Amino acid sequence: MLLILKYFMITCFAYVIIRIAVPYLVLFLRFMFNEAFKWDKYVEKPRLVFYALGLFSMNLGYNGIVEPLERFSIFSYATGGFLFLIGMFTTQLTWSKWFERIFIPKIKEKLKTSRNFNISISKSQLGKLYDNLVRYDMVIIDKTSKVDFIQCFLEDWDEHDSKIHLKLKNPACKEFYELLKMSFPKNDLQLIDFIKNSDVLRREDGRRYNYDTVRNALTRPRVSKRSEELEAVFAPFS
């Protein structure tokens, strides 16, 4: 019985190895003869990891059955069989359409670096904030519409060309940032993203704010000349 099981497992090993080798042999031959071939590294690299894990698990399972522990042979057989089946399942999984069409895109989405403000605020709240900035003449409406304003805060920076043109000096700009963080404390908004990395903020003259200048603003005194107006802008959200 053990001999039959051993040969069966060796056959499974051979099947898995051949199944793994054939597609890559075809790719190699196409490469050697300068034929067009498709190599999607975002799929094939994870697939190779799954192959390695599957074969390693199958090998552990094979050894656990063929060379069981002297005292715990039943446990060794059960563990070996489980590991072997898990290894087989892992390699089989990579050949399914689910792996390429669902699993890989989901993993890529999870690992994708988000280039946005990562801000937790609704469109209606941003619209209200924009209206308050317009009321106190803190934004250039000819260059920044309400749609632009909302887009800059909620969408990825690379997906739009909108800019926020503020009528705020460096100290007032920093105070605007601090009040925004205070009014919406669940946000992960960082000053360096707000001023520098996003490249969506503009001064009244159309130039970019200097991050170091804004960062060191409000050192003395602790409020800007437009402090009372800024507090009024954010008053509805406190």
Image (tube, rainbow, N blue to C red):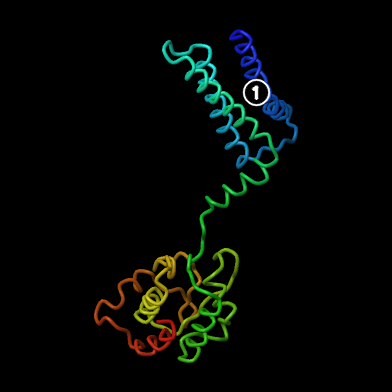
Question: Would you identify the image quadrant in which residue 71 lies?
Answer: top left
**Count of picture labels:** 1
| Position above or below: 202 against 64 | below
Please give the residue where the numbered disc 1 appears in the rendered image.
16
From the top left corner, tell me how far across and down residue 150 is, in percent: 55, 76
| SS category of the residue bearing label 1 | helix
| Position above or below: 216 against 50 | below
From the top left corner, tell me how far across and down residue 187 is, in percent: 43, 68
Q: Residue at x 65, y 23 (%)?
A: 16
Left or right, 43 with respect to 219, comes to: right
Q: Residue at x 68, y 34 (%)?
A: 95
Q: Residue at x 31, y 76 (%)?
A: 217
Report crowding for label 1: few under 14, some 14 to 19, many 20 or more residues within 10 A (C-alpha).
some
From the top left corner, tell me how far across and down residue 33 is, in percent: 74, 27
| Position above or below: 119 against 106 | below
Q: Amino acid at mark 1?
A: Val
Tell me the quarter of the image containing the N terminus. Answer: top right
